[in-house]
Amino acid sequence: MNIYFSGIGGVGLGPLAEICHDAGYNVMGSDRETGLMTEKLQARGIQVHIGQDGSFLQASHDAQPIDWFVYTAALPPTHTELLLAKRLNIRVAKRDELLAHIISEKQLKLIAVAGTHGKTTATGMFVWTLQQLNVPVSYSIGTTIGFGPSGRFDPQSEYFVYECDEFDRNFLHFSPYLSIITSLDYDHSDTYTAEADYQKAFAQFASQSRQVLAWNDQHAEVFDGLFQVSLLDPSQINQTIGVSGLYNRRNATLVQTAIKRLGFIQDTDGVVSHFPGTDRRFEKLADNLYSDYGHHPVEITATLQLAREVSDHVVLVYQPHQNIRQHEIRDGYTNQFELAEDVYWLPTYLSREDPNLEVLQPEDLIQNITNKARIHVADFNDELWDIIQAARDEGKLVLGMGAGAIDGWLRQKLGQ
């Protein structure tokens, strides 16, 4: 099977390209510019063309007909390669449709990790724990990790562990063998017009799963009547496990319970306690400096709680994500920042925006925050970096948070 990835260097398609390559398929693709992922794929012998004018797609198809053209949601409907693929009558699909096909074709049991928050960390924990138990595992994680590639196909594996994202209703392509749902808070208003629609999609996802583990304090009524859903009570959280952060312990408890459901009875406390984490999930960049992907009020609360377990003095540098999302959650910014001594609020990172929607400024978003006196409007400049360095020198933990440019800016300042 010949598979072409448009946007092959992205965090979603890059790992999937690796999985397909490992699984024996012929893989190629294009991207707008070179990057770490495109270089990594090329080093593995995968054809990657920089530029997306359609010439590489046409030449590849002429040489050997392409079976699948796979693209991301970020690709506009007028994109040159997408239009060409349709004219060439190539099967066009997003990544999850292809992955569901591969899982079925390879007869793997899908372990799906879903939820509004915590998916990446829980997926990483799941993969790490199975690896430490010497269980062959194939997987896909939506970030880079230090204990393997982001995506891997092991021909010896029985299971495929997948970070199953609800954006664009992607997770509804799957019928998992076992699912865990880490949390359930309304998100992705560009896909789901109302909270009820969001919850309905999770109920459908659960109904498509053979067995599900979730928390009973996370809208248990959503799963009412679904016999395959087992609800855990917060009293069952493994508080003795050696990981920081309440939500990390919740995730670890779900992972440990799921692994027992698979029939592995080993004590995994020690294994999970040594979980090295994933990139951009409370990732330590340098002494007293951390980076986190959080960009939702619930994630802010959870990550600051984790940070305060590590340090009594926390300074937050926060970059909101997507203007369209800020219009939805602006009234939700209230008491999430209580555990931070100071908060430096950056302009919103703009992505997939409605051009007719007013861009909310930091001053618009901080109106209802309870510790408003600690909020400082900031920007990416030398002044902010000096503030960060001074806080680090004083022994404070500085946390850069956001799904946009903040992580790259911090790494650039560190020379990473």
Image: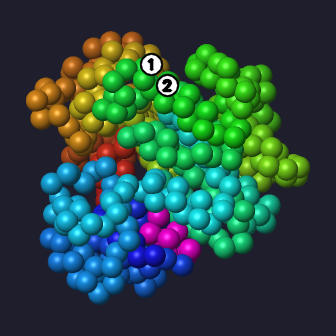
Q: On screen, 89 above or below 364? A: below
Name the residue nearer the viewer: 25 or 273.
Answer: 25
**Amino acid type of the residue tagged 2 in the rendering:** Lys
What range is drawn magenta here?
16-23
Element type at mark 2: helix
For disc 1, the marked residue is 196
Residue 52 included in the magenta stretch of the image: no
For disc 2, the marked residue is 200
**Label 2: how many Cα within 10 Å (few below 14, some 14–19, many 20+):** some
Name the residue nearer the viewer: 134 or 220.
Answer: 220
Q: Position of residue 247 (x, y in %)?
A: 62, 33
Name the residue nearer the viewer: 366 or 392.
Answer: 366
Quarter of the rendering containing residue 399: top left
Q: On screen, 405 above or below 23? A: above
**Amino acid type of the residue tagged 1 in the rendering:** Ala
Left or right position of 122 against 257: left
Name the residue nearer the viewer: 229 or 185.
Answer: 229
